[in-house]
Image (cartoon, rainbow, N blue to C red):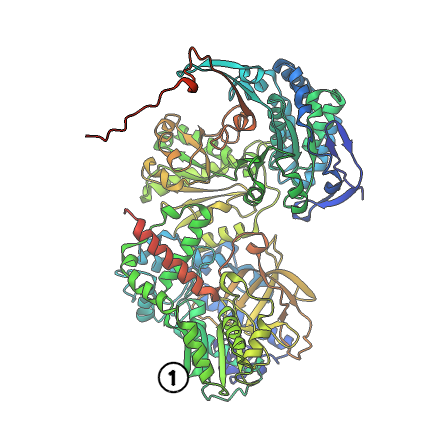
Amino acid sequence: MSIVAEAMRMANDPPTYFGGSGGAAHQIPRAEAEAMQAAALRERFAELRDRLPVLKSAADEQGMDDIRTLEDGANLLFPHTVYKSYPASLLEKNRFDRMTQWLGRLTTVDLGGADVGDCDGIDAWLAALEEGSGLSVTHSSGTSGTMSFLPRTTDGYRILSDVFGMTSRDFNELDPHDHEPWHCFYLGFRGGRSHAGRAAGWALDNFARTADHFHPLYDVDMSSDVMFVAARVRLAQARGELDRLEISPSLRARQAQFEDVQKTTGQALERTFERLLSLKGERVYIGGMSGALTDLAVRGIEHGVRDLFGPGCVVQCGGGGKGGRLPDNWEQLALEFTGARRIGQYYGMTEVTMITSRCSEGHYHVPPWVVTYVLAPETGRPYPREGVRTGRAAFFDLVPQTYWGGFATGDEITVDWSPCRCGRTTVHLHANVQRFSEKRGGDDKITCAAADDAHAAAIEFLASSRSGAAS
Amino acid sequence: MSRIVAPAVIRGQVIVDDLVAFGGRGGEMEFLSPDPMKLIDRLPLRNPGEMRRLYTLTIDEIIDYLVELGRRLDLAHNGFLQEALEQSYAATDLTPPILRWQYSLIPHFFSREMVRGYIDVPIGIPYVEGWRTTTLADGRVAAIRAMGARCLHITAGNSPITAIISLARNALTRSDAIIKSPSNDPFTALAVARTMIAMAPDHPVTQHFSVAYWKGGAVEFEERLYQPRNIEKIIAWGGFASVKHVTRYIQPGLELISLDPKRSATVIGREAFASEGAMREAALRAATDVGASNQTGCSSARVILVECGTDDEGVRKLTRFGELIYDAMLKLPDHVSNKPKAFDPELRNDIQGLRAGGDFYHVIGGRDDEGAIIVSKLDEAVDFYPRLSGRVANLVPIDDVAEAGRFINAYTQTIGVYPEALKLRLRDELPLYGAQRFVSLGYAMTANPALPQDAIEPVRRMVKWIVDESCDPAACPPLWESEPQGSEETAP
C-alpha cells in the first residue's frame, strides 16, 4: 500500500486504523508518523483547496496550490478566532439564516437542507443543522463572551468519541478489547452540544454503554442558549453594560424550563452521593468536574467512607472547582475516597480530534493523526521541530474531511521533541499549558467543566432582569 | 552593560542610596532605584505646617517659577531631559519619534498663558490667592479659600505629559506632591525634579515635589505610606488594575481622585459623505484620532460610528471611507504616528479570524502589524473592541446618529465628532450613557489641562475648600434667641 493510502486510512478513521488500541497509536516511529502526516496533509489540502470557501480565500491570498511539507502547513493555520468570527447580535436576534450562511463558509457540507428559518435559539438551530445536514456542531463554552462553533460532522463526533475511548483505556492500562459496561458517573450535565456536553456522551459511549449504567450528576442536557446567556452576562458585567443586555422573547419564553433545570441541581450532589455508596465494590468510572468530585470526596471521608471502589476505579476529572478554586489536596481526597490509583488529566480542545492524557512522566502525548506546531508568539512563524520549544500551540487535525483542520490556538505550550521516557514515540507537551489571554491578565475564563456555575449565573440574570425589565 | 539608575527625589534632595533592581514592563529593561522601604520614613511630609512656605508666594510668583522651569525644560539644552529621553526608549510603549516629539512639547505646557489657565479656569485665581467673601441669603458672610493638600500622584506612563500636568497642578494649588512614577516612564518626572533643583533648590515649589518609584501593588510599602497621617489625596491615573488596587487603601481622611481607565468613541455624521472633499477631510481627521501617539491614549479613537446607512450602499461607502482613513493614517507625520512598537498577538489573531471568517467584516491593512481598519458590515462593533490598539479601529455603520447611545457606556470618555454642528445634538444625550467629552474630530488626542477631565475637575478636587463664616446676630438670627415653631394641634 502506498504511503498516501496508508496515511489516509489513518487520517480518515484513526480508531479503526489502530484497532482501537491507544497504545499502538503512540508507538509509530516519529519519522514514519511525520511522513504519513505530510502525505495526509497534502491530500487534505488537495481535497479542500477549492471546495472550502474559507480555505480558498486564504490559499488564494498566499498563492498556495500545494502543501509539500509539514512546514508548508504552518502557513495555513487558521486562528482560533475564525470559528467565532460572527457578530454576536445574530444569535441575540435569532438570525440563524445568516449564521448558517456564515458557517457554510467553514464547511463543505451543504447546509441548504437545514430548515433554520424558524429557529428560536441556538439549541433549535443546532438541532436543525443536525437533522437537515448531518452536522454535529460542537461549540465552546464562550469564555470570551462569544462561542466558537465547530462544524464537525456526525461521523467526526463518532471518531472523537472512539478516540476518547482508546486514549482512556491506554492511559488507564485497561484492556482495549474489554467492552463490558462500567457504572459511569458523569459529574456534570448529561449532555449538550458544548465540548463539555459532548464529553458526557463519550463517557456514555465508551464506559456506561447502556443508559442504565450512566449516572450523570444533572440528568438533563445543558442548553446552549443558557450557556450563551451566561457568556454574554459575564462579558456585559466586565464592560459595565449589563443594563444593555437584551434577552430575546423566545429565550424568555423558555425561562421557566431553565429555572426548573436549575432547581433540580440542588439535590443532585446528595442523590449522586447515595448512588455512589450503593455501588460499593462495583466497577466504576467517574468523569466530569473535579469540583463536584472533591465535594463528594469530602462528604464521603467525613462519613468515614474510604476506598469505595478499589484500585480498578477509573477517575478522569478536570476543570477546577466552583469559581475555579479547589483545595490543594483535592486529588488526594478523591483518591482516598474512591480508591482509584490515579486521576486522569487531559489537554484537548473543541477544535481538534484529540484527547491527550498525561503519561507516567507527566507529559501530554499528541496522537499521530494530529500535527503539532509551536509558533513564535510575536510572529506566528513555526519554531524548528526539535529540542524543547515554548510558544503558541497550533495543530493540524488530519481527521476532518469537511472543514479545515489547521488551527492556531490561544494556548501557550512547551513541546518536547525528544523521545519520552514513558516509552511512547509521540510528540509530548509539558504540563504547564496556559492561555495567552490569562498570561496577559486578560479574560478570566470559565473552564468548560465549570458549566454549572455558568448555568446558575445565567438563570440568576434571567430572573433579575425579568423582574426589573421595563421592555 | 551599563546599569540605568532612576534616583528618588525627596523635597529637593536627590537620593541614590540602597539601590535595588526593578524590571520594566514586558521584561524589556531593568533599572535601579532606591529601595522604597528605606525611603518610607522620609517620603511623606510629616509636618503639614511646612506647607506654610508655599503661602509666602503669590500665584504670580508661582507662575513665574513654572514659566522659568518650562524655559529650562527645552530638550535641546537640558541634559537631564536628554538623558531621560534616551533611557525611556526601552521602557515606553511609544516609538522614539513620538516620544521625542512629546518631550519637545513640554515647554508649550509651561507657557505663561497655559499655566495661568490651569488654575484660573477651574478654580479662579482669587480663590487660591486669598479669601473670597460672599454674603448668603441667611445673612452670613462666608470667606472661601482653596488651599493645598498633601497629594500622591500615581501618574500614567502612556505620555510624559502626565508628569508635567501633575507638577503644574501641584504648584498652583500650593500642595505637596509625591509622584509615583510608572514603570513605563520612570524617568520623566525625575528629570523635571532635577531641573527644578538645579534651578532653585530652596524654592518652596522645589521643596514640595518628590518623585519615587515602587512597584504598584507593593502592599507592605503602600499600606504604610497610604495613611491619612501621610497623605490626604491620591490622584490615580491609569489602568483598571492599578486604580482598582488603590481603592483598598481608601478610608476616611484619605480621598481617591480617580482618573479611571477609559475608552473613546467617534461619531461621524452623514455630512461626511456630502462631497469628496468632506469625505477626505473627515477621513484625515478620523485617522489622526486613531493614529496619534499610536492609539495609546484613553482618548484615542477606537470604535467609529458612521452615519452612512446600513444597506449595501452604506457599507460600500463605509468601506471606501475606511480605505481613506487607512491611507491617511499611514501618511501621518512620523512624530504623530508610525508603525507601533509592539502589536498585541491576541488582537492579531482576532483580526485574522475576521479576515478568514468572511461575511460580516472587511479588514483593511493589518498584515504587517502597521494598524488596520475593520469595517463592520452590520451595525455592531467587534466583540473584542476593548482591546483595539496598535492603530486598529472599527468602523460601524449606523442609519441615524440617534443610535449612538447604544455604543456608549460608563467607560466612555471622549467622543470625537464630525461635523461640528453634530456636537450640539449629541452633547445633551450621550452623557446620560457615560460620554464625558466632545471634541472636534481630529483633536481627540490634544488636550488642555485647564479643562475638566474624566467628567470631574481634578484641580477642584485636589484642593481643600476652607470656609470662614461670619455671623452677625443683627443679620443672622442667633439660635439662642430662636422660638419653637409649628403647632401641636393636629391637622384638620
| Residue occupying image coordinates x 43% and y 74% | A270
Q: Chain of mark 1?
A: A
**Is B256 placed left or right of B424 in the picture?**
right
- Depth check: A124 or B157 in front? B157
Find residue A17 and report its horizontal and vertical position in percent.
51, 82
**Is B53 placed left or right of B349 in the picture?**
right
Query: Looking at the rendering, in which quadrant would you find the C terminus of chain B?
Result: top left
Q: Residues within 10 Å of mark 1 (few under 14, many from 20)?
A: few
- Which residue lies most toward the top here? B474
Amino acid type, label 1: Asp
Q: What is the number of callouts on the image? A: 1
- Say whether residue B191 is visible: yes
Query: Looking at the rendering, in which quadrant would you find the N terminus of chain B?
Result: top right
Q: Against B473, is A42 above or below?
A: below
- The residue where tag 1 is placed is A212
- Say whether residue A367 is visible: no
Q: In the picture, residue B8 is in which quadrant?
A: top right
Find residue A167 and report its horizontal and vertical position in percent.
54, 78
Find residue B10 and report its horizontal and vertical position in percent.
73, 31
What secondary structure is found at the residue carrying circle 1?
helix
- Depth check: B304 or A219 in front? A219
Find residue A236 and report its horizontal and vertical position in percent.
42, 49
- Depth check: A334 or B133 in front? B133
